[in-house]
Image (cartoon, helix red, strand yellow):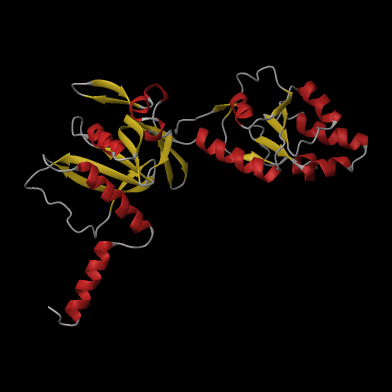
Amino acid sequence: MAEEYSVLLSHLVKEHEMQIVHVSEDYEQARIYTMAVGRPGLQFAGFFEYYDPHRMLVSGKQEHTYLERLDDEARYKSIDGLMSRRPCAIIVCHQIMPFPELIELANKYDVNVFISEMDTSEFMAQLIGSLHVHLAPRKTIHGVLVEVYGEGLLITGDSGIGKSETALELIKRGHRLIADDAVEIKRISHNNLVGEAPAMIRHYMEFRGIGIVNARFIYGVGAVKSSQTIHLVVKLENWEDYKSYDRLGVDEECTEILGVDVPSVTIPVRPGRNLAVILELAAMNNRQKKLGYNAAEDLERIHDLSVDNDLF
């Protein structure tokens, strides 16, 4: 079974600057487990098929106008039908003051109710995006994550291969560190991975013979970043003379992480190779490929054209 992640409701309230109307007795411990967010319009109309009390409900002008047009008895019955099923939270947008019946029934059934000054669609988009980050599937891997020319490079390899030293040289060349030694990776959408450092070791780097250093304090806040989308996996391995390495780049490698195939390259390491420069090149080449240009394919096309026209 996949591990279930959650986020404190109180954390979301602070993050999205919601105003508290009523909170339940277990508010400080209440957690949200689903990325799905609902609108309570159908529930106010009495339709509860597929209703999920674990979804946060966002109410806007449509719901407010519908309830406003009901008489007092019908409005109370409509709101009671929903509140009696104890949704985990209701957020009323546009700074609209909830109906007195909703506040009364929130107290009766101990339901969390909040107000947001934001537009309903804007708030829902922001909340869903936040939930996708907080509840995303995740794993921690051994490696280094850096941002090079806007590309997130996940550097992997055996201990002592030179991952941290390469990251240090990249920092000195103006690029940014996200995580050293351990990288927490979250899948925030079906094809998007975001990496960050565990909170305890954020901005710290380890170098054998020197020890632990704080990259932010030594190189400044411009040398570090809290999180980064992963665009390319760079595998460092010791150079082996008998092994055949890709010299053209026509066949693209991928590394599967949390069900997402990420482009990858394998870089053989031996004394004298400037890995920082090579990784800068890898980042720029990967960006070119995303923009539609592949140098290896271009050269192959020119070669085939020359053969066909007997230019050799």
- Residue shown at the point (71%, 43%) measured from the top left: 119
Foreground pick, 82 / 107: 107
Q: Is residue 290 visible from the viewing direction of this image?
A: yes
In the displayed structure, does residue 204 sit left or right of residue 37? left
Q: Name the quadrant containing residue 89.
A: top right
Give the total number of marks visible in the rendering. Answer: 0
* Residue 158 x %, y %: 20, 33
Determine whether 234 is above or below 159 in the image.
Answer: below
On-image quarter of the N terminus: top left
Judge whether residue 135 can be spotted in this image: no
In this rendering, position of residue 217 left or right of residue 19 = left
Left/right of residue 73 with respect to residue 44 in the rendered view: right
Q: Position of residue 142 (x, y in %)?
A: 29, 31
Spot the residue most to the top: 25
Q: Is residue 288 above or below residue 111?
A: below
10 to the left or right of 152: right
Q: Residue at x 51, y 36 (%)?
A: 133
Viewer-closest of 173 and 87: 173
Camera-nearest residue between 272 and 294: 272
Image spot of residue 32 (x, y percent)? 59, 29
Residue at horizontal 24 percent and vertical 60 percent from the top: 250
The residue at the far left in this view is 242
Q: Nearer the viewer, residue 58 or 33?
A: 58
Q: Where residue 179 sits: x, y (%)?
A: 35, 32
